Image (cartoon, coloured by chain):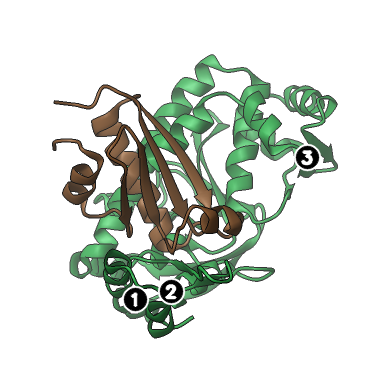
Amino acid sequence: MRARKTVKLRLYVADNAPNSARAIANLAAICKEHLQFTFKLEIIDVLKSPLRALADGILVTPHLAKLSPSPAAKIVGNLSDRSGVLLALGIKP
Amino acid sequence: MSVARALRLVTGGPERRAIEAGEIDAVIDSATGNVFLLPQAKRALSSAGGEAANGLLAALPRQDHQRLLAELELVPLAYGEVMYQPGERIRHVHFPNDAIVSLLAVVEGKALAVGLVGREGMVGIPLALGAELALVRAVVQGTGSALRMKAASFHEALEHCAPLRREVQRYAYTKLVEARQTAVCNRFHGVEERLGRWLLMTHDRVRADRLHVTHEFLADMLGVRRAGVTQAAGDLQRRRLIDYRRGDVRILDRKGLEAAACGCYRIVKVLAG
């Protein structure tokens, strides 16, 4: 079953460094395919907003946080492991 | 920061594993809030004031990247230089560093921009798709440098380097998305909205708020007369979104310009990643 509730996501990146660029591309593909228009994504560049990252307890980038619906989840890395990302987001592939 | 030092800052299991797998760009020191870039990310972003490395190549695993460097030659690209015309054989692929290249479709002597290439991509996609001849005119829009590779070497590299093949395929897809959206955009959107979109696309590919583009160039890109560009640029200027004089455009209000541009800018950005 596909998620019908709006999925709120936050992706922490370091400018367009290779893994960050890759994470954005991978996430965009996943959202397009599996979430259609039922997602909200905020992208935070830790180089521009380091304090925000610190306040949110982010240790590395790329870092994807699923904020809602619960359970909350986090995934670190460039999101190339699509099935792992889908599992963490609670979407059945 | 070295990988070993980064590992010392991180205690969590998933974070450590991701660092070891080479999937991490930056580490944040939770004691100080300082952000440290890992070597590969630092190299890719080390563009301040100088040359920005091509992102498509930087996304490759280090070993593949280094192997390819042997086949790559650094070349300068100057504003206005025509790299190839429709029907010409493509002899090299180019991976721009800080140069920007416009791709223009040409019909009956008239040209219209159908794509823009900067440090995120490459010029010469037909070679990756089995074609040898150019279908568009490639013109340098922003002076800078690029790494180029001979067509034969590129074919060989595609055959032997799966990560390169993947990156090039992914990039070819983004160009397809861009071209499709541009086709719709050119038919349905006004000059001002389209000008806004092209300025944003250009702005994304440079690391400054100043762009050098003449009226003539913009007229070609948008497929309108120069008077049309004058009017559209004047409108954006009156709204204090840009400052435009003698071919120098300064982006004053990026958010405002995004609102003034057509939605095609955002659609391509989201769909093409």
Which label is found at residue B62? Answer: 1
Give the structural element (helix, strand or loop) at label 3. loop
Give B19 or B146, whichever is nearer the viewer.
Answer: B19
Quarter of the figure that contains the C terminus of chain B? top left
At mark 1, the secondary structure is helix
Q: CA distance from mark 2 to mark 1?
A: 8 Å
Contact, mark 2 vs mark 1 (Cβ under 8 Å): yes
**Residue B48 to residue A6: above or below:** below
Tell me which residue sits at (77%, 29%) in the image.
Answer: B233
Residue drawn at the location 52% of the way across and 15% of the way down: B188
> Of label 2 and label 3, which has the lower sequence position?
2
Residue A4: image quadrant is: top left
Supply the letter of whichever chain is green.
B
How many residues crowd around disc 2 within 10 Å: few (fewer than 14), some, or many (20 or more)?
many
Q: Nearer the viewer, residue B224 or B175?
A: B175
Up-down relation of residue A75 to residue B106 (above or below) = below
Output the chain of dot 2.
B
Q: Which residue is mark 3?
A: B252
Q: Is residue B77 left or right of residue A88?
A: right
